[in-house]
Amino acid sequence: MRAVVTGGAGFIGSHVVEALLARGDDVTVVDDLSNGKRENVPDGARLVVADIRDGGLGPVFERARPEVVFHLAAQVDVRVSVERPAHDASVNVIGTVAVLEAARGVGAQVVFSSTGGAIYGECDGPAPESAERRPLAPYGVSKLAGEEYLAAYNRLYETSNVSLRYGNVYGPRQDPHGEAGVVAIFLGALAKGQAPRIFGDGLQTRDYTYAGDVARASLAAAGHAGGVFNVGTGLETSVVELYELCRTVSGSSLEAVEAPARLGELQRSVLDVSLAERELGWRAEVPLEEGLRLTWESIAG
């Protein structure tokens, strides 16, 4: 298969590129390197340094002639979305429309990386795709808008674009600096011998999903007739439980530092993944402790 991966030099995107290359696909990566890194792009993939909003995607797609576009280029920082909502919308909405138009020009399907927790908001149990959508920040709103554009293009042009609502993705190459996933923050701190902070009582739960499993879900969505699918484990783990597992895999005895609860933080977020199991034939395979161990090995060297 010929594929384009936008954001393919980033954390999750680079795992998708690896999975495509592993099965022999032809891969072009489009990334502006604002967050992604050249060294994340595996050998065998072509890198085109470009901003998806700059109007140059058409010629890139004409050269690559992708059958599927895995669209992972995004503004992913919730705090940035609150502070700079216009910037968030520019990347996540206008950028997504640009990708859809370029893909339509070459007849390619788009598989879009969306978000579960930021779209569903507070959960009272594993949220199915039909659950009420209650985003608490512009980031969730912009991702939901992207989904709606994909669905509208499916209706208007009879395309088969797919949106994947991720759980809390973790794994090698996630940046532990600044605003990042809690796994990268915890393990990054422990690698430096520093005690990380736990905000509030640490009982807030998330659906932690290994990046390699997310990459497999992306490939499973390619060729599907379209729709929206949750991509997670269906299991929830508290921050306290997560930190204990991080201590186990790192061999650390450091106690976490207590910090005040953060205003507006979700207390419970977990996904119902039965639809992806039925329609995509996909389910998460990497247990949390195993995934954390793989992540620790990548950080600790």
Image (spheres, helix red, strand yellow):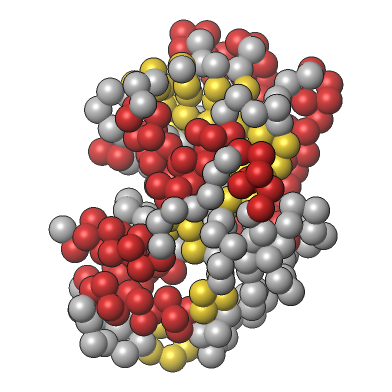
Q: Position of residue 268 (x, y in %)?
A: 64, 74
Q: Position of residue 104 (x, y in %)?
A: 67, 16
Pick whichever, 278 or 195, lies toward us: 278
Residue 135: image x %, image y %? 74, 60
Answer above or below: position of 16 versus 48.
below
Which residue is painted at 49% across and 53% down in the image?
284
Residue in the foreground of this view, choosing between 158 and 181: 158
Residue in the image at 23% along x and 73% along y: 250
Image quadrant where one finds the C terminus:
bottom left
Count of numbered badges drawn on the protein:
0
Using the rendered image of the protein, determine whether residue 67 is visible from the camera's viewpoint: yes
> Which is nearer the eye, 188 or 159?
159
Q: Nearer the viewer, residue 233 or 171?
A: 233
Residue 98 shown left or right of residue 197 in the figure: right
Residue 74 appears in the picture as rendered: no
> Which quadrant of the structure image shows residue 23?
top left
Residue 154 horizontal side relative to residue 238, left or right: right
Q: Residue at x 66, y 39 (%)?
A: 279
Q: Position of residue 177 (x, y in %)?
A: 35, 62
Q: Is residue 262 above or below residue 269?
A: below
In the picture as drawn, the residue positioned furthest to the left comes out as: 301
Q: Where is 166 relative to 37, above or below?
A: below
Which residue is found at the position 82% from the left and 60% from the top? 132
